[in-house]
Image: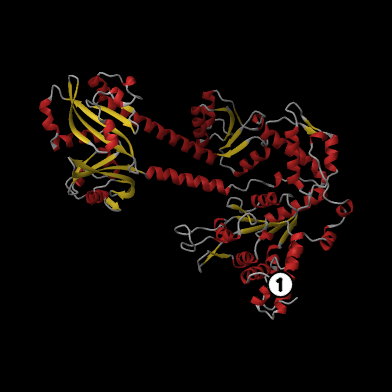
C-alpha cells in the first residue's frame, strides 16, 4: 500500500483527503497545514490521521507520494527541493483532476451495474419465456418464465446446446437460415406456446446468435388473435421501452411520430405533444433524419452522430426497421447521449496537454558536476536560461546535452509552456519537414484531413530542442534559418506564413566549423545558432565528477533492478579512473549497469572483476592534445569522404564547363544523383575549386 503525505488542508486538500480515505487503497501518513482549524486538519483528526504544521518530520524513507494542495508555487518549490529522490510530488490541481476522473469512472460503473441489474429484473419478471443462443447454438439466456413454462432449470440449460435441452427447438434452423419466425404455434408436451424466433446480428450484419420469446397460451387461447393486433403490439412495446434508460422513438411507415419514452423527453426536451403525429424531422437540430433514411432503404443504420432538440444535444443514433409479416410498418430509434462522454474526452485531452507541458523533466539540480569545467558550463547555461536568445549546446555524444536543454527550459520564463524534443538524426529526411513545420490538407498523398500542426507550432510560447542539428540536410537548414530570422513558418503545401514564438535550443557533437568548410552546414545558420554557445566538457576532462556520478547511477540502478548496491570499491574505481570514457556519461551508465547485473544479489560492493573490460580507444599522447590541436590534425572518415566528394564534383563541373549531364557521365552517376549531391553540399553554378 502506498504511503501518502498531504500538504495543504484547505477546501481542495480536504476534498482530496476524503477521496483518498474512502478508496482505502493508500495510507495517508499525515496532513500538514499552518491553520490548525483548516477543514482538512479537522477531518484528519476525526479519522485518526497525524497532523502537523511542517512537513519535514514526515519525510521518511517509507514515504512514497506527496500531494501539494496549498496552491502556492513557492511552497511547491520548497517541498520539491527538500523531498527525497524516491518520493513523487504531485501538484494539488492534478491530484484533484485525477480524483474527479476516478469518481466519474466509478459513477459510470455503478450506473452500468444498475442498468444490468434492472435488465435482469425485467427479463426474470416478464411473463414471456426468453431463450438466447450464440452462433454455435449454445444457450446463453434462460429466464425464469422459460424455467416455469418448460420445467427445466436454467443451470441445466445455460452452456448446453439448445437441441439437447429444448424439445422441438428450431433455434438452430434460425441460425442456419438467418430468417425470423414470428407468431409460431408449438406444443411442448402438454403445453401450448406462441413463439417468436429472431436471428441476432452485430453491427457488421454478421449472425452472432438467435433469440426465442414465447408465451404459454394453453389457458388463454382467446388472446392469440388480440396479440397479433397492432394496438396490442404497440402497448407491449410501449411498456418495454418506458422501462429503459435509453431514449427511444418510434415512427410509422409514413414517418410520423408514434411512440416516445420518458428517457427521450429527458434527453431532447420534447414531449409527446411536440412529437407524436409530427414528421420524424421535428427533433433534428443538425443532421439527416435516420428514421426517413431507414423507411426509404429498409435497412438499419448504426452509430450516426447528430444533434437533437432545442438544446442541440449531441447524440448517437441506432435505427432499425419494424417489419410485420414481412411488411415495413415503421422504424424504431435508440438514442444515446454522448455529451457526457465528449466532456470526459475533452477533460482527458486537457490532462494530456497539461502533462505534455510538464515534459521538461530535469533541472540544474539534476546535473552532477563540481569540476571547474562543468561549473563553467552550468553557469553559462543558467545565464542563458534568463535570456530568450538561441542556445547552441556543443559536446561529444553522451555528455548530457539534452539534460542541459531540459534545465535551461525549466529555469526560464517559458517553463510552464511546451518543451518539445526533436532528434533531427532520428527522423527521415522525407518526413522531417512535415514534422517540423506541419502541412495543409491535400499537401501530399496520405495527408490528414484538415492538415496538421508542426512541432514549431506546437512549441509556440515554449521551447523546442533540436538535437543533432548538424545532421540536417542543407535544404532543411535553410527552412530552420527562416524560422530563426523571420519568427514564422510555412506549412508544407501552403504559402501563408504562420508566426511562432519559440525559443530554440540546438545541440550537436559535429564539428560545425569543419562542416561549413566541407559545405555540409550553412554558415549563415551557424551564426544564427551560435549566439550563446555552451561547450559541455567530456568526462575525461572532469574526472573529479566520476565518483558522484557513480553514486547517482548506483541509486538509479538499485531502484530499477531491485538491488542493494552500496558503493564501488577502491580497486574498481581506480580502474575506472584510468579509463578515458570516449562514450562519456552514457558509457559510464552502460558500464555500471552491466557491472550490477554481473553481481550476485547478496553482494553490495562493485569490485573490479564485476566491471566489463574497458579498452582505451585513444593513445596517451593523443589524449594530451588540446581540442584545437586535434581539430587541426584529425578528420572523421565521414568528413574526409564528404570533402573529397565535393572537390571531385567541382572538378567535374569545371571540366564540363558547367554541363551537369557531362559532369554526371564523367563521375559515373545519374544526373538525378548529381543534383542531390549539389543540393547536399550547397554547390552553386559559380563555385570553383
Which residue in the rendered view is the most extreme toward the bottom? 657
| Residue at which label 1 appears | 649
> Quick check: 108 above or below 416?
above
Residue 465 lies, in percent from the top left, at 64, 55
Which color scheme does this rendered protein use?
A: secondary structure
Q: Is residue 547 left or right of residue 166?
A: right
Front-most of 384 and 229? 229
Q: Quadrant of the C terminus?
A: bottom right
Residue 241 lies, in percent from the top left, at 25, 36
Mark 1 falls on what kind of element?
helix
Front-most of 358 and 36? 358
Q: Is residue 462 left or right of residue 636?
A: left
> Quick check: 5 above or below 577?
above
Residue 119 lies, in percent from the top left, at 31, 30
Front-most of 112 and 89? 112
Q: Tell me what residue is drawn at x 75 percent, y 45 percent.
A: 587
Front-most of 326 and 319? 326
Q: Tell me what residue is drawn at x 70 percent, y 33 percent.
A: 558
Q: Quadrant of the N terminus?
A: top right
> Quick check: 179 above or below 420?
above
Q: Is residue 178 visible?
A: yes
Q: Is residue 442 left or right of residue 669?
A: left
Q: Is residue 589 left or right of residue 324?
A: right
Q: Tell me what residue is drawn at x 74 percent, y 26 percent.
A: 602
The quadrant holding residue 659 is bottom right
Amino acid at each position: 500500500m502506498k504511503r501518502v503525505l498531504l500538504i495543504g488542508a484547505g477546501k481542495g486538500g480536504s476534498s482530496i483527503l476524503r477521496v483518498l480515505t474512502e478508496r482505502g487503497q493508500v495510507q495517508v501518513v499525515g496532513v500538514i497545514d499552518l491553520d490548525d482549524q483548516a477543514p482538512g486538519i479537522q477531518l484528519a483528526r476525526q479519522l485518526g490521521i497525524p497532523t502537523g504544521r511542517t512537513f519535514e518530520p514526515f519525510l521518511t524513507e517509507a514515504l512514497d507520494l506527496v500531494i501539494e494542495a496549498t496552491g502556492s508555487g513557492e511552497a511547491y518549490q520548497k517541498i520539491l527541493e527538500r523531498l527525497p529522490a524516491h518520493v513523487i510530488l504531485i501538484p494539488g490541481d492534478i491530484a484533484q483532476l485525477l480524483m474527479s476522473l476516478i469518481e466519474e469512472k466509478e459513477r459510470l460503473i455503478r450506473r452500468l451495474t444498475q442498468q444490468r441489474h434492472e435488465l435482469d429484473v425485467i427479463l426474470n419478471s416478464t411473463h414471456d419465456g426468453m431463450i438466447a443462443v450464440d452462433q454455435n447454438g449454445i444457450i446463453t439466456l434462460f429466464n425464469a418464465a422459460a424455467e416455469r413454462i418448460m420445467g427445466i432449470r436454467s443451470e441445466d440449460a445455460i452452456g448446453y446446446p439448445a437441441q439437447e435441452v429444448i424439445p422441438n427447438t428450431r433455434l438452430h434452423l434460425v441460425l442456419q437460415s438467418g430468417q425470423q419466425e414470428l407468431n409460431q404455434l408449438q406444443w411442448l408436451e402438454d403445453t401450448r406456446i406462441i413463439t417468436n424466433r429472431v436471428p441476432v446480428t452485430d453491427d457488421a450484419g454478421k449472425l452472432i446468435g438467435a433469440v426465442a420469446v414465447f408465451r404459454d397460451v394453453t389457458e388463454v387461447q382467446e388472446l392469440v388473435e388480440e396479440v397479433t393486433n397492432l394496438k396490442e403490439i404497440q402497448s407491449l412495446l410501449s411498456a418495454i421501452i418506458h422501462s429503459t434508460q435509453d431514449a427511444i422513438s418510434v415512427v410509422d411507415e409514413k414517418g410520423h411520430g408514434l411512440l416516445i419514452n420518458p428517457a427521450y423527453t429527458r434527453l431532447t426536451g420534447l414531449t409527446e405533444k411536440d412529437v407524436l403525429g409530427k414528421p420524424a424531422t421535428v427533433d433534428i437540430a443538425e443532421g439527416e433524419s435516420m428514421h426517413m433514411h431507414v423507411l426509404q432503404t429498409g435497412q438499419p443504420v448504426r452509430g450516426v452522430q447528430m444533434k437533437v432538440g432545442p438544446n442541440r444535444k449531441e447524440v448517437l443514433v441506432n435505427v432499425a426497421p419494424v417489419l410485420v409479416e414481412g411488411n415495413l410498418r415503421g422504424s424504431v430509434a435508440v438514442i444515446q447521449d454522448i455529451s457526457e462522454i465528449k466532456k470526459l474526452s475533452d477533460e482527458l485531452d486537457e490532462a494530456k496537454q497539461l502533462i505534455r507541458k510538464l515534459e521538461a523533466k530535469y533541472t540544474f539540480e539534476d546535473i552532477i558536476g563540481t569540476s571547474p569545467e562543468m561549473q563553467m558550463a552550468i553557469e553559462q547555461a543558467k545565464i542563458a536560461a534568463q535570456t530568450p536568445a538561441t542556445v547552441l549546446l556543443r559536446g561529444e555524444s553522451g555528455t548530457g546535452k539534452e539534460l542541459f536543454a531540459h534545465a535551461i527550459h525549466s529555469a526560464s520564463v517559458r517553463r510552464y509552456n511546451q518543451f518539445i524534443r526533436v532528434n533531427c538524426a532520428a527522423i527521415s529526411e522525407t518526413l522531417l519537414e512535415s514534422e517540423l513545420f506541419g502541412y495543409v490538407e491535400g499537401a501530399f498523398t496520405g495527408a490528414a484531413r484538415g492538415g496538421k500542426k508542426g512541432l514549431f507550432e506546437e512549441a509556440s510560447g515554449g521551447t523546442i530542442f533540436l538535437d543533432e542539428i548538424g545532421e540536417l540536410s542543407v535544404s532543411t537548414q535553410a527552412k530552420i534559418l527562416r524560422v530563426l530570422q523571420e519568427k514564422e513558418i510555412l506549412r508544407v503545401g501552403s504559402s501563408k506564413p504562420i508566426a511562432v514564438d519559440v525559443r530554440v535550443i540546438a545541440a550537436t557533437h559535429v564539428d560545425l566549423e569543419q562542416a561549413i568548410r566541407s559545405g555540409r552546414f550553412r554558415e549563415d545558420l551557424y551564426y544564427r545558432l551560435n549566439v550563446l554557445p555552451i561547450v559541455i566538457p567530456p568526462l575525461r576532462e572532469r574526472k573529479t565528477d566520476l565518483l558522484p556520478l557513480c553514486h547517482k547511477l548506483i541509486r538509479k540502478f538499485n531502484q530499477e533492478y531491485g538491488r542493494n548496491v552500496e558503493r564501488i570499491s577502491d580497486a574498481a574505481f581506480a580502474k575506472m579512473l584510468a579509463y578515458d570514457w570516449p562514450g562519456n556519461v552514457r558509457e559510464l551508465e552502460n558500464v555500471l549497469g552491466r557491472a550490477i547485473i554481473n553481481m550476485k544479489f547478496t553482494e553490495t560492493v562493485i569490485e573490479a572483476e564485476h566491471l566489463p573490460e574497458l579498452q582505451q580507444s585513444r593513445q596517451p599522447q593523443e589524449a594530451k592534445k588540446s581540442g584545437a590541436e586535434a581539430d587541426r590534425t584529425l578528420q572523421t572518415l565521414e568528413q574526409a569522404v564528404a570533402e573529397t566528394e565535393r572537390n571531385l564534383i567541382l572538378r567535374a563541373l569545371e571540366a564540363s564547363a558547367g554541363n551537369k549531364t557531362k559532369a554526371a557521365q564523367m563521375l559515373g552517376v545519374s544526373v538525378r544523383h548529381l543534383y542531390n549531391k549539389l543540393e547536399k553540399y550547397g554547390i552553386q553554378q559559380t563555385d570553383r575549386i
